[in-house]
């Protein structure tokens, strides 16, 4: 065995154990030499296989690690895989024997496959030929088949968990009556994920029948012993859906057989009419009667076949009606939820806009009231100011009076005449007087 620099070595695992720090230690031997190996804690989750005592493994060595104080050489491993198909096949057979002892490999305990499934679930790798082959085979054999596909990893350490999750999701579909698990061929290492015990138990416990189209006859993983085995993706359609062409051919054959019976009955009637009452015709009649009895039995067989086909067609129609009604109910429920969400969102938006509008109106009312109060205050101030100005200019408050004759103000002695009635307006009231004499100034007379 090599132990210098990056390398891959094979050997048998001895005494694997985990240290308190989480590091994995184990010894690797070829029967003579023994090497000490270790895997750091950070690389444990990336291992394809966790070694057990007695495993035959291939170990990728990153580098040697020499400890001078103890004079000890360890090999630091970065990856561990089961080595050789022999070990994988041995483990496969052990699992088959264990599951068989529990009855999981008994064909009588498998769920029966429906003759006319409402929908077929297909689990395969994303973009894989196996997925395309299964769907093509299903549509070729039964046009119009409803296929529900689900992708998953179909190789590697994480594949079993993803396949189990895909099984759970597909079997919950309300129309799926059967599931096809498909993957193309490969080596024993490539198909090792289908030898996983958890996956096999999930296939057995699945609520709907499962058809495994995994691998080929020469490489038969454990899942093919637990579920219905198609071995190849293209053959899975034969176990899942009926053949439309065969049904049409059986109907045509039955129709032709019925037509032949009618023709032979007409021929027999013609022979009897020609023969009349002769005895040889009686023998011929008996022979014809026997033949007709045989044909009647065949007709009954054909009738039974036709009744079975009609019954299957009615059952399939009923399932289609139920499935269509369920789909319509699902769509109606989804549309109803969508409309409710739309109305709820619209109502919320309207309420937000209405609240915003109310806030805006309240704010405008406050602003208008404030502006009105300010304007009233300004008007009152202006009126007070104007009244003060008017009072300040009112000559009557200063002892003056206004004299008027017949409503016209008296501006000069010329406006007066002896005996004229004068209205005198003072600050606090009015009085009337009569002119006795008019004495104009000399200056005004000179001016005149």
Image: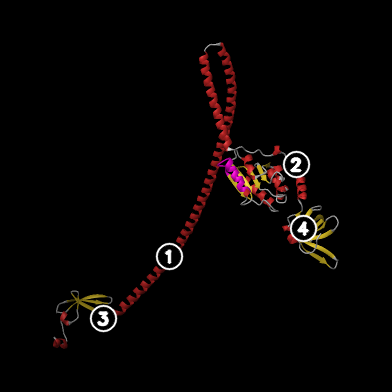
Q: Nearer the viewer, mark 3 or mark 4?
A: 4
Please tell me which residue is depicted at 82% across the width and 66% down the height of the picture. Answer: 66
Q: Which residue is mark 1?
A: 364
Residue 372 sits above or below residue 86 on the image: below
- Foreground: disc 1 or disc 2: 2
Task: Classify mark 4: helix, strand or loop.
Answer: strand
Side (left or right) of 393 relative to 57: left
* Residue plotted at (51% across, 18% down): 270
**In the depicted view, which residue is nearer to us: 352 or 418?**
352
In contact (CB < 8 Å): disc 4 and disc 2: no
Q: Is residue 444 visible?
A: yes
Per the rendered image, the range of residues in magenta is: 130-146
Q: Is residue 286 above or below residue 211?
A: above
Residue 330 magenta: no
Structural crowding at the residue carrying mark 4, measured as other residues with C-alpha within 10 Å and reported as few (<14), some (14–19) or many (≥20): many
Q: Mark 3: which secondary structure? A: loop
* Residue 101, image x, y percentages: 76, 41
Q: Secondary structure at mark 1?
A: helix
Check whether the beta carbons of the residues at disc 2 and disc 3 lie within 8 A of each other. Answer: no
Label 2: which residue? 100
How much space separates mark 1 and mark 2, taking CA atoms? 85 Å
Say which label, 1 or 4, has the lower sequence index: 4
Measured from the top left, where is residue 430 in percent x and y?
24, 75
Taking depth in this image into account, of 230 and 329 the one nearest to the observer is 230
Q: Which residue is mark 4?
A: 59
- Reading the chain from its start, which is encountered first: label 1 or label 2? 2
């Amino acid at each position: 065995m090599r132990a210098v620099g990056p390398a891959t070595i094979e050997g048998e695992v001895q005494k694997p154990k985990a240290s308190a720090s989480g590091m994995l230690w184990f010894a690797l031997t070829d029967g003579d030499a023994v090497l000490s190996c270790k895997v750091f804690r950070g690389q444990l989750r990336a291992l394809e296989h966790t070694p057990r005592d007695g495993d035959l493994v291939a170990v990728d060595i990153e580098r040697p690690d020499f400890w001078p104080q103890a004079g000890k050489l360890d090999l630091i491993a970065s990856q561990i895989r089961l080595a050789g198909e022999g070990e994988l096949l041995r483990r496969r057979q052990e699992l088959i024997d264990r599951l068989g002892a529990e009855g999981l490999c008994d064909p009588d305990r498998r769920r029966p496959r429906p003759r006319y499934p409402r929908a077929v679930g297909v689990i395969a790798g994303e973009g894989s030929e196996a997925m395309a082959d299964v769907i093509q085979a299903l549509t070729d054999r039964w046009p119009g088949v409803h296929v529900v596909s689900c992708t998953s990893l179909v190789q590697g350490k994480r594949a079993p968990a993803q396949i189990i999750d895909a099984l759970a999701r597909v079997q919950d579909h309300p129309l799926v009556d059967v599931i096809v698990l498909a993957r193309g061929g490969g080596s024993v290492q490539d198909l090792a994920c289908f030898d996983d015990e958890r996956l096999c138990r999930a296939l057995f416990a699945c609520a709907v029948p499962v058809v495994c189209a995994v691998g080929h006859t020469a490489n038969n993983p454990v899942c093919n012993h637990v579920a219905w085995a198609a071995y190849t993706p293209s053959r899975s359609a034969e176990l899942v859906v009926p053949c439309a062409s065969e049904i049409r051919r059986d109907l045509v054959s039955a129709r032709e057989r019925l037509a032949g019976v009618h023709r032979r009955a007409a021929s027999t009637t013609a022979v009897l009419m020609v023969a009349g009452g002769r005895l040889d015709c009686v023998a011929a009649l008996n022979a014809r009667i026997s033949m007709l009895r045989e044909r009647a039995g065949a007709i009954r067989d054909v009738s039974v076949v036709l009744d079975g086909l009609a019954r299957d067609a009615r059952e399939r129609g009923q399932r289609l009606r139920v499935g269509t009604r369920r789909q319509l109910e699902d769509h109606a429920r989804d549309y109803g939820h969508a409309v409710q969400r739309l109305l709820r969102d619209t109502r919320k938006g309207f309420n937000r806009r209405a609240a915003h509008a109310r806030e805006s109106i309240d704010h405008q009312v406050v602003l208008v009231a404030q502006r009105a109060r300010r304007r009233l205050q300004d008007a009152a101030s202006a009126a007070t100011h104007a009244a003060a100005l008017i009072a300040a200019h009112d000559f009557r408050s200063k002892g003056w009076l206004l004299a008027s004759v017949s409503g016209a103000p008296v501006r000069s002695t010329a406006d007066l005449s002896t005996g004229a009635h004068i209205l005198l307006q003072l600050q606090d009231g009015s009085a009337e007087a009569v002119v006795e004499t008019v004495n104009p100034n000399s200056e005004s007379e000179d001016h005149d």
